[in-house]
Image (cartoon, helix red, strand yellow):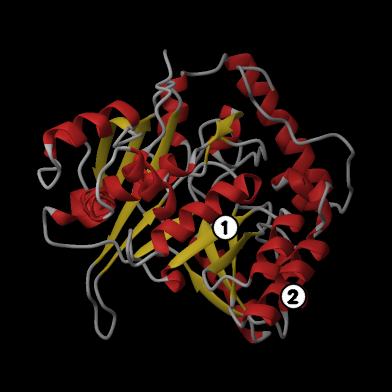
Amino acid sequence: MTTDARPGLSGLTADELAAWVKAQGEPSFRARQISDAIWKDGGTTEAAEVRTLPGHLRVALERDFRLDTVHDSEIRVADGGLTEKVLHRLDDGELIESVLMHYPARGASRERHTLCISSQAGCAVGCPFCATGELGFGRDLEMAEIVDQARHAARRLATDRKRLTNIVFMGMGEPLLNLDRVLAAVEALNDPKRFGLGARHITVSTSGVVPGIRRLTALGPQFTLAISLHAARDALRDVLVPLNRRWPVAEVVDAARDHAHATGRRISYEYTMIGGVNDTDLDARALADLLRGDHAHVNLIPMNQVAHTPWQASPMPVIETFAAVLLEAGVGTTIRRNRGQEVGAACGQLAAERAGEPPAPAVARRRERLVLASAAALRGERSEEPAPAMVGGEP
């Protein structure tokens, strides 16, 4: 697979686009015309369609830039059309995913259209309940490749005269390990002259990259910070979120707490509920003690089934009991219902499907090691051995 060396046009800042227009000997208003053509309702993907430009400038635009960086997009629809899972192929053959979720108006709640986007191809964190973790790390996405996922969704919505209302960085990859490009993407998505989505409608998630959280705090952004927590006890979080060995849970929550104090923005904690693993009364009380009194909200999410783990989602009565412990401690809590399960809407599932089935012995070894690791963690035992990944078919 060859890589197109032309930069993505949506990755240019306003100043960079103005400089290019000037270099072509064109008047400055051409930059505004190009920007409108790229961003309005998701924009065009072909320079020839930018009819506001003279022919020679359309040729130059096509010569120097890619007007779209996500290609061969496969769309799978679930939940009666309320969930659209999209597999995008990039110019170098890497696969990434986005999920568009529709929420009809209900009572006082307005209609919403939320897009979950990726920041990396694959992921280096290796959470064992996540299909992306099985793929390993491919590469960081360019800024244009991040925002073009949003442009792709916006074009689809525009056909029904609808607009994206929310964007969450909870797709493939760890956003704070690609922070410069994620911040540039957020700036473009928020810019009223480009995508034009309010900062408070953008959520950036992290599995606990403390230096990245500290950097965000210093910048003081108004988007929502979400922490993929999944366990409040270090022994268990070491297994579920391997980054915990580098930045333990108390350090992650301290950084998030400082962020909330500095920005005034509530922290969202994501907690995947795994039956018999992190859903015990001990875990509920540990999470309640960890977050008691904080400006925070917990989202409890039943685990999406991932083919090569031995675990299942917690039963709903268990999740409800877990939530009751948090609520009694004054911790705001919501139980999320899964979407798009019949089309593999969990992060990385379509890309993992394309990667092919790993050998059965490798799957069996990984399952056995995960069972042993989680059992030891439930006993409070911490291990120096990393949780078993499955990259290239071997755990």
Q: In this view, does 93 lie to the left or right of 242?
A: left
Would you name the residue on which mark 2 appears? 258
Q: Is residue 338 above or below residue 349?
A: below
Residue 301 pos. (x, y %): 51, 59
Quarter of the image with the N terminus in it:
top left
Q: Residue 24 carries which label?
A: none
Q: In this view, does 311 lie to the left or right of 256?
A: left
- Distance, label 2 to label 1, CA atoms, is 16 Å
Q: Is residue 322 above or below residue 311?
A: below
> Which residue is located at x 66 percent, y 35 percent?
124
Q: In this view, does 293 lie above or below 161?
A: below
Picture quadrant where residue 239 is located: top right
Residue 188 pos. (x, y %): 42, 57
> Which residue is located at x 12 percent, y 39 percent?
54
Residue 221 pos. (x, y %): 57, 70
> Which residue is located at x 85 percent, y 34 percent?
385
Classify mark 2: residues with Cα within 10 Å, few (<14), some (14-19) or many (20+): some
Q: Is mark 2 on a helix, strand or loop?
A: helix
Residue 48 pos. (x, y %): 14, 34
Would you name the residue on which mark 1 appears? 205
Q: Which amino acid does label 2 sit on?
A: Asp
Q: What element carries label 1?
A: strand
Q: In this view, does 269 lie to the left or right of 37?
A: right
Quarter of the image with the C terminus in it:
top right
Residue 46 visible in the snapshot: no
Q: Which amino acid does label 1 sit on?
A: Ser
Picture quadrant where residue 177 is located: top right
Residue 19 visible in the snapshot: yes
Picture quadrant where residue 386 is located: top right
Q: Give the mark count.
A: 2
